[in-house]
Amino acid sequence: MKKFYLLAVLLFFGFAVTGYAQEGVPADQVIKMVKDEYDLGKLKFKKGTTFYMEFTNISKKPVIVQNVMVGCGCTVAEKPSAPIMPGKVGKIKVGYDATAAVGSTFKKDVTIKIKGAQPKTVYFTGEII
């Protein structure tokens, strides 16, 4: 009976550790971001902005951006539709609506999911005037 409990506990921990494992290589081994944090400066209230987060494919294979996730409803992001070839630059279009309270600062995140790599999170900051 002790062997059964021991086996059950070992199996449970084995599955628990496997569930938390990250897939793929670190994103920084596949892409090189131009910036890890973008400063948008001062934005007028409700006068949003659009900008591009750029990266270079530093791997030897095409990079496929599977998904781009944003941290809140005030931000939208558009991933590249085609694979980014080795040595080439990819762009992620990001829009921010600037509806936070006047006088406030913000720090928002955009998480990039690359096929075969761990997610990469990039930030942008600014102030609403």
Image: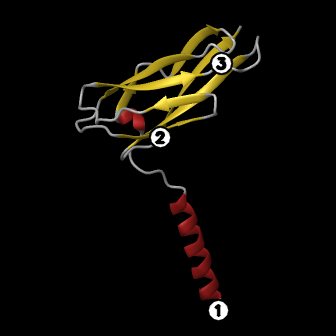
Residue 61 quadrant: top left
Q: Residues within 10 Å of mark 1 (few under 14, many from 20)?
A: few
Name the residue: 64% across, 23% down.
Answer: 107
Residue 87 quadrant: top left
Q: Amino acid at mark 3?
A: Ala
In which quadrant will I find the N terminus? bottom right
Q: Could you say where residue 51 lies in the image, as x and y percent from the top left?
A: 48, 17
Q: Could you say where residue 66 lies in the image, as x and y percent from the top left?
A: 40, 43
Give the SS element for disc 1.
loop
Q: Amino acid at mark 2?
A: Pro
Q: Could you say where residue 38 lies in the image, as x and y percent from the top left?
A: 53, 17
Q: Earlier in the sequence, mark 3 or mark 1?
A: 1
Q: Which residue is mark 3?
A: 98
Name the residue: 53% across, 60% down.
Answer: 19
How far is disc 2 from disc 1 in space, using C-alphas?
43 Å
Disc number lying in front (2 or 3): 3
Q: Which residue is mark 1?
A: 1
Give the SS element for disc 2.
loop
In the image, is residue 73 above or below residue 129? Answer: below
> Who is closer to the viewer here, 76 or 41?
76
